[in-house]
Amino acid sequence: MKIRYMGQFSGNEDDLPRQPHRPGAVQFKEPDMKKLAVWANVIALGIIVALMVPLALQSWFTVDGWGFVLGALMSLVCAIPHEYIHAVCFRDTAYIYTNLKQGMLFVVGPEDMSKGRFIFMSLLPSIVFGLIPYIAGFTMHNVFLATLGAMSLGMGAGDYINVWNALWQMPKGALTYLYGFHSFWYRPDDGSRAEAAEE
């Protein structure tokens, strides 16, 4: 596994690394990059509000201190390691890009993945920077951790869309791969490729 930081995305999807389409591949029913950015921002806002409301009802939680400010800022700092955590879930080379025009960072890798590994890869950064700090902050009455967790969980909205698509569109035993900005699934010709992706 190698991770390569590629810098600013050119805007041309054809510049992204890819492999030939697999026989019988089916593209996920998913929005294009612009619509995805809009949907992700709307979902992110909803998640953050939903997670902040229970915090606001706690006597120990306050938004006028350094804990809240630092937690919010740290969630932005975690955007880069967020992508690296995605990247370490790839077995072959993963490529990290910035897309500052749309306020996004993203990672691509053209290898095959099982549904389970794809979902794990998509959710892992939100678990590390979101769910664990949020639960810890709520339990320990720590404003910094709770804020970091709430904001980071919201910032994983685009990943949740990918998880939703995989859960509802990939049949049992199918493999998925990235081709440009889009995800495709297909049924392997024999069990050996499925077993290799699960290892």
Image: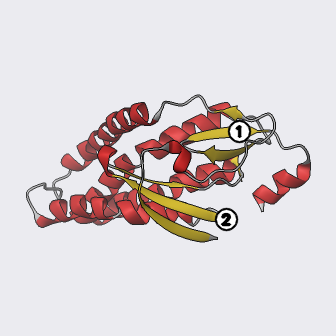
* Amino acid type, label 2: Asp
Q: Which residue lies furthest to the left in this view?
A: 64
Dot 2, how many residues are within 10 Å of its Cα: few (below 14), some (14-19), or many (20+)?
Answer: some
Q: Is residue 112 above or below residue 69?
A: above
Residue on which disc 2 sits: 92
- Report the residue at 48% width, 60% height from top: 96
* Amino acid type, label 1: Trp
Dot 1, how many residues are within 10 Å of its Cα: few (below 14), some (14-19), or many (20+)?
Answer: many
Q: Horizontal placement of 77 versus 30: left or right? A: left
Residue 174 percent location from the top left of the image = 77, 41
Foreground pick, 89 / 179: 179
Residue 140 percent location from the top left of the image = 30, 66
Res 171 seen here: yes
Image-quadrant location for residue 72: bottom left
Foreground pick, 66 / 2: 2
Q: In this view, does 165 lie above or below 71?
A: above
- Report the residue at 33% width, 34% height from top: 42
Residue on which disc 1 sits: 185
Residue 168 percent location from the top left of the image = 63, 32
Q: Horizontal placement of 140 versus 161: left or right? A: left
